[in-house]
Structures are given as C-alpha cells and as structure tokens.
Image (cartoon, coloured by chain):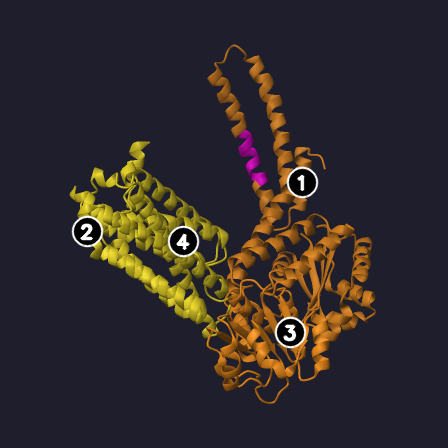
Chain colours: A orange, B yellow
Amino acid sequence: MNLRILGCNFQTATVDLREKLAFNPEQQELALRELQSRYGCEAAILSTCNRVEMMIARGPDELPFDIGLASEFLGEMHHVPASAVLPLLYEHVNEFAVRHLARVTASLDSLIVGEGQIAGQVKQAFEFAQKLGTTGPLLNALFPHALRTAKRIRTETGISHGHVSVSSVAVDYVRQVFDHFQDKTVLVIGAGKMARLTLKHLEDLKPGRILVTNRSPQKAQEVASMCGGQPWPWEQLDVALSQADIALSTTGAPEPIMPAKRFHEKVLPHRGSGILVVLDIAVPRDFDPSIHDGDRVCVFNIDDLTRIREQTIAARQKHIYPAEQIVEQEAKRFQNDWDRRKSGPIIQQLRTQVDKVRVQVVGPLLGKLNGKLTPAEKEYIEGAFKLFQNKLLHTPIAALQEASKEGESRKLMEAIRKLFGLSE
Amino acid sequence: MTALLHDVTFTCFGLSYLLALLLELAAMRWPRPRLRILGLVFGTLGLLTHSLYLASKHPTPAKPYGALLSVAWVLAIFYLYGALHYTRRAWAIFVLPIVLGLVGLAFVVVRQSAPPSESELMFGMSGDHIWGAVHGVLLLLASVGVCVGFIASIMYLIQARRLRKKLNPLGGMRLLNLERLEQMNRQAVNLAFPLLTLGLLLGAVLLEQYHNLANQWFSPKVLGTFGLWLVFLVLLYLRYAVHVPARRLAWFTILAFSLMVLVLVAAHPFAQAEGRS
C-alpha cells in the first residue's frame, strides 16, 4: 500500500488560511486532473469549511506523494507560496491514513464531534473523484470502507445522538409535544436574527398558520412576507397567544413582555385544553419562566436550549472511546482484506499451476497401473499426491501472506513467479 | 400436533415475553439493531405460543385466569404492532410489563384455584350461552381499551415530567409526543366506554335470565364493573365538559386500570353458576 492523506484542518490552520486553500468544484476538478496527469496517482480531494485534504494512492514501487510535493501542489493551485502552506499540513501514511479517513468520516476529528454533515461530504468527495475517473482500486476500496465504518459507529454508539444547534434543540422540544403541525398556529414575537433561524426550522414542520407580531408593524409585515405568515397587531398579543400552539419570542425588550400575572389573567383563561410551547430565545427573557408548568404551558428559554446543547456535546464525549475501537477494528480488517486481495491472485495462480502439474504426473501413472489397482488404492495414491502438493505449497503461500501483511511482498511475488513459471 | 398443543404452558409464552422485555431493555442501554430484532423474535414467539395455549385450552373469559390471559393476548398483539410501527420508540418497555403482569396474575390465579372442569371449558361456546359470549367479548375489548389508555397515560406522565423538568428531548428513552399519547388515551377511552356500557347492560339482562343469580347483583365483579363504568363516565365528563388538563386525565385512567385489574381477578357470577350446576 502506498497511501497518503495530506491536508490541513481547523486545528492546524486558521479559518482565513483554510479559506485560501479551499477548493470550489471547478478548482477541485482541475486539481484532480492535474494530480492524475502529473503523478499518475489515484486522487480524491475533501474540501469543507473545516478541512482541506488530498487522498493520494500510488503504485507500491513508486515514490510516495509526500508533504513537500503536497505543499507545492496546493501552493500552485491557490497561488500561495509553498513555504506558507507547508507548516499547516499534516500527513497520514498507509494504515494511519486508513484510520484517519475513517475518523474523519465518523466525525471523530470534527470541531463538533458526532456532527452528521461530514459523512455526506466525504461521500460527495469520493463520488466526484470517481466520476472524473481519478480513483483506482485502493481509493475505491478505501472510501466505502470509511463510510461503512462511520455508519457502524453511528449505529453502535451514541456519538451522533441529539442536536447541537439551539434552533434544532428548540424544534426537538416542539416535536416532543406535538404530533402534526398542519392544524397548529405558530406565533412569532419580534424579529431578531435568532428568530428567523428558528423560524426556518419551524417552517419545515409546515404549520397551518404563522402569525407575526412586532412593535413595529413594518418589521412584522417584513417577517410575515418572508415566511408566508400574516402580521398581527402588537396590541393584541394576548389574543394571539391564546390562539397559538407555538410561540417564538425574540424581542429586544429590556423587561419581560409577558409577566406571569398578565399570562394567567389574560391568556390562560382564553385558551382551550391544548398545550402552548413558548420558545423564548430573547435576552433578556420575554416570558416569565414561572409560567412554565409542563402541562398546559411549556416555556423553554435560551438558557434551557443552550444547556441541552452543551449536555449533548458532553454526552458525545463518552462515545469517543468505543468509536475509536471500532475504527481500530475496521482499519485492521481493511488492511487484512487489502493484503489478501494483493496476494490472492498469485496464490490462486500458483495453486492452479501446481494442480495442473500434479494431474499431468498422476494421470499417466494411474493409466499405467490400470487394472492392477483397486479403486481404494487409486484414491489413496491421488490423495498422497494432493497431500504432497499442499505440503510443498504451504511454506511459499504462508511466506507470501506474511510478506503481504508487512508490505514487502513484491520481491517474493517476483521470485515465486520465476520459480513456478507463472505468467505476469 | 394435538400433543404439541397440549405441551404449551404458561412458561412458554411467559418466558418468551420476559426475554423480549429484557432484550428491549438491553437495546435501550446498548443500541444494537440485533438486540431489538431478537427481542421482536421472542415477542413473536410469545404471541404464537400464547395463541396456541388459548386455542388448545380455550379458557373461559368468565373465569379470572381466562379473562386475564385473553386481555394479555390482545395486548401482546398491540405490543407487536407498536414495536414494528414505532421502531425507534420505547414501546415494548411499556406494553410488555402489562402483558407479563396479566400473564403472571393469571398464573397465580390458576395455581390457587381448582383445574377448570369440562363444563367451564365449554362455557360461552355453546349456543345457549351465545349472549354470554357476546357479553364476554364486549367486556374483553373494553378491558383492552382500558389497558391501552393506561399505557398511554403512563407514557404521557413520563413525557410530561420530562418536559416539566426540561430534560434533554432526545436523551433517555424515546417516547411518543404528548399530543399522540393524549390522542391514544382519548381514543382508547372513547372506544372502551360504549363497549363497557353494552357489556354491562347485556350482563344485567343475563343476570336476570339466570333465576339462581338474583343474589349476585352485589358480587365484587358486578359492583367493580359498575364502579369502572362510573369512573369512565367521570373521565369523559372531565375531558369533554370541564376540559381538565391531560395530566389529570392520565391519573384517572390509571385509576380505571387499577379497578379493572381488580374486576378481572374477581370471580364471575356466571362461572360460579356453571361450577355449581
């Protein structure tokens, strides 16, 4: 195996440097074609906001594509001096490269461990290179292996459980309360940036009605037209709350807009038996937290959502060790499969060749002795020759398998070819 | 084949359900698809042997052990349906303990009572007692409704508690959302009430028909069933007239379930009459 993964990530390069080294699809295509034509290698490039990596595989006898070449190549592609690129790069070789790609795909090497996006990006990088024809036997085996390993880790550990964005956690809470949303009303109070982000998540649930209220009617109109909702007068906030199922509040008010007294007097008596979920992501808070009773009204404020986000990130940490063990197991399995694949054809050829010789010797012998031997004796002679053949081949096959594992099988394969007269 | 059917015992399906539950608990702790699949296999085996047991022994629902086993059987179907439908939810963990509890109770009841006579085994099967069988089926289905309502209520209370405490929405066991659970509880109660009412009315008529059962009006079974009907009536009133929050309704459903278990365990006047004759 002559495999290298070279690149930089959020740990080795700052965001502005990563931006300089990132590839857009056109640049990626050009780079892959260049790598293939210049170095005659298998190549794939993974370029995300957190990392830029090149996966390069060459023939076992060829010089490896080292970190020096990589820095020159990246520098040339992005018009950055190679000397500026070199200190940012890391290099993973052979079995370490196999492990590295599996770790990256399983999001063990990500800024937020367990995030699900990277596996898709790795898959895209592979498919892109495959489409261009810059992958070969090694990368075609390596990428599916990494994707399988990541899938196994996701299934067998809790590393990807939960959400780590405040908006997603808010929607998770909403989903714990409601089953369907076509008959639900979402009330948006205020028009902060956070509200728009969370509203986008809520819109995906396809609620029946969206009401938008704001101190400024223009802003309410603006947000309402963006999300297909209807503006609602600020003065009728209590009425809107008595009709809403989900309230998303992000005003910049210095005091709570909904104190407990007002809520219990003007909103709660007018509501039916349905539950109201309030997502209060304003700072300072818009809703008095004492309104939350977990039965008729559930209030989740920014502290609650951030706490869950942090809990999720912390909970993922305990799954890192089991995930690393899976990476280790799978990397070993890949290595063994690859070794077997490399020495497999020559072992098969060797067996066929010696089989042929045995048949050539045993056939005439049994012909000459025809009529003098019982069927049992014939079988015994044939068995003895087979045993002899197996014993004779055992040592070279075992040596070949051993050498393949150690990556030094080339000379031995050459010798076996010559000794047994095998074709190339 | 007949010998094989007669070899099926409480232990066969009881242990199968228990293993299915243990595997589900293990799958919750160590999320492995094969554990869940194995749990489903044992659950299916349990249901199969349970069905064979009912088919070979056909215990009368008028006897506590027959009623308990029949309700457990319908709930086992409910478990299997839910486990296949809500693959990512902690469904089995809530339904299987009820199935196991009912089977266990039936086991205790059958050990403490004399073995069923031929006349008991044939009870409800003959043409003379067709209305008795209808009465039994109505009350059996009503009981299943109460069990479903109970399971939904327990899940609802746990889910509501998690929301009240603002626990991680995706942490711990995965439950159905409050709206779905409330709907499940409502549908179960709405379905059980008319069945219970019809079953009760039919039972009253049948009691009158049996000239030797006039003194059974105040038996624990009859009084308990009537009490259960009253609880249901209050439950419906609270839901539709007073709009009581769902959490309190869940507690009421749990009360109805407890009463139902007592009613199921109590001896039935018809079966007693059959035993005497």
Q: Nearer the viewer, mark 3 or mark 4?
A: 3
Give me the C-alpha separation between circle 4 and circle 2: 50 Å
**A8 or A128: which is nearer to us?**
A128
Residue found farthest to the bottom:
A254
The answer to whether residue A64 is above or below residue A370 is: below
Q: Which mark is residue B23?
A: 4
What chain does mark 3 sit on?
A: A
Going by the numbered disc 3, the residue's amino acid type is Leu
Give me the C-alpha separation between circle 3 and circle 2: 64 Å
The image quarter containing residue A43 is: bottom right
Tell me the residue that label 1 is attached to.
Answer: A415
Q: Which residues are magenta?
A: A388-397
Q: Nearer the viewer, mark 1 or mark 3?
A: 3
Q: Nearer the viewer, mark 1 or mark 2?
A: 2
**Regarding mark 2 in the picture, which secondary structure is present there?**
helix
Q: Is residue B125 magenta?
A: no
Magenta span dominant secondary structure: helix
Going by the numbered disc 2, the residue's amino acid type is Ala
